[in-house]
Image: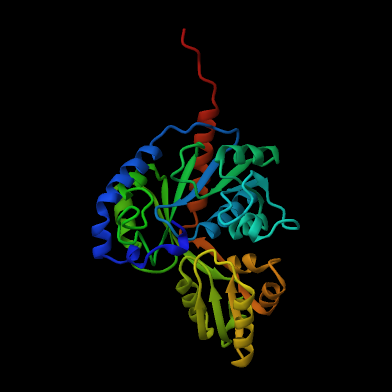
Amino acid sequence: MALDEAPPFWWQKNSWQGYALSPLSYIYGRIAAKRMDMEASKKVEVPVICVGNFVVGGAGKTPTVHMLAKYARSKGFKVGILSRGHGGAITTPTVVQLEKHNAHDVGDEALLHANNSTTVISANRVVGAELLIKEKCTIILMDDGFQNPSLYKDFNLVVVDAKRGLGNGFAMPSGPMRVPFKHQLHHADAVFVTGKGDAGDLVIRKSARAGKPTFLSKLEVQGRTKYKGEKALAFAGIADPSKFFDTLIEIGVDLMVSQGFGDHHVFTEEECADLIDRSKTEVLQLFTTEKDAARLKGMGEAQDKVLELSEVVKIALKPEDPAMLKRIFETTLKRFNERKKPVDPIV
């Protein structure tokens, strides 16, 4: 199921649709859980940290990966980011090149990653990881792939959107869970709650009872003071556009018009023309997200024009616990070093 087709009842408690589909969810959940339990088929020669989520949809994985990448670089690592390349037309393992590729080729997330670190798109995670190693990367950050058992991960950091949480708690197709929650939590090494909201409280409580470290985040908008008082027409094609619109209001933007699109939306020439015309007619400044900007760039004259006229709001995540990143990397390297030790032969 495409992400932008996710039905609204996935995020509603006690919906009749969720209960009606629950027998199918039970079957799907059993199969997905069995697959997740499979032994990893490949261990690569560098540490691997996976940033995943429990549910279908955005939870803040991309800024979390960038937060980890920044820390890793500060410790002397050459960071490689492994992405599936969701939404891109290229199906072979590929090193993303900003001067060559656009969102149609590799997807929006891969472009954002490539602006940050060496990035490879690959549906085959093992082949993608090996390609990053050929690029001389000394640590791999996986964007998604938590439920995929093909590549061994030294650390699984699972991201939870504080506003959406686990939705209705059902596995697909009744709800947004990729695998039943209890089963996924068993495989997680830590939980990272992003943004503001109460929906993440249940995850925090359950994670604590399971003995999983849980970290909270602060959201930082770069250059936020310059946006205060701007009369805005904001548009976003992400999993939950309302999060972006709420952020603009929080930093003092006078949000006059908000227009949401489906996740990973491909903007047409007509849509771009409408956005430009309305912003000019109503004398409003266009605002959008980094992901949308990546999806607009190089996609056509109208798309480039919208991007030129838009304020692209850059958002970063920062852990509330300053020791979080140190703990994650110490654990990762300890596990990596343990698995690299030679095994004594049995005499």
| Residue farthest toward the top in the current orientation of the protein | 347
Q: Residue 102 at what x, y percent from top left?
A: 68, 60
In terms of depth relative to the viewer, which is nearer, 315 or 40? 40
Q: Is residue 334 above or below residue 243?
A: above
Q: Which quadrant of the rendered structure holds the N terminus?
A: bottom left
Q: Would residue 95 appear left or right of 235 to someone viewing this image?
A: right
Q: Is any part of residue 109 visible from this angle?
A: yes
Splitting the image into 4 quarters, where does residue 270 fall? bottom right
Name the residue located 36 percent from the left edge and 46 percent from the top edge: 184
Query: Where's residue 115, x and y in %?
Result: 67, 58
> Between residues 249 and 5, which one lies in front from this camera angle?
5
Please name the colour scheme applied to the rendered image: rainbow
Can residue 58 be spotted in the picture?
A: no
Q: In this view, does 32 lie above or below 226?
A: above
Left or right: where does residue 80 sit relative to residue 203? right
Q: Residue furthest right?
A: 99
Image height check: is 212 above or below 9?
A: above
Q: Position of residue 280 (x, y in %)?
A: 64, 89
Q: How many labels does the image show?
A: 0
Give the residue at x 56% y 83%: 233
- Residue 127 placed where, x, y %? 60, 37
Q: Which residue is drawn at 52% across and 49% down?
A: 326
Which residue is nearer to you in this view: 78 or 38? 38
User: Which residue is at 60% across, 33% downward?
Assistant: 45
Pick the front one: 99 or 189: 99
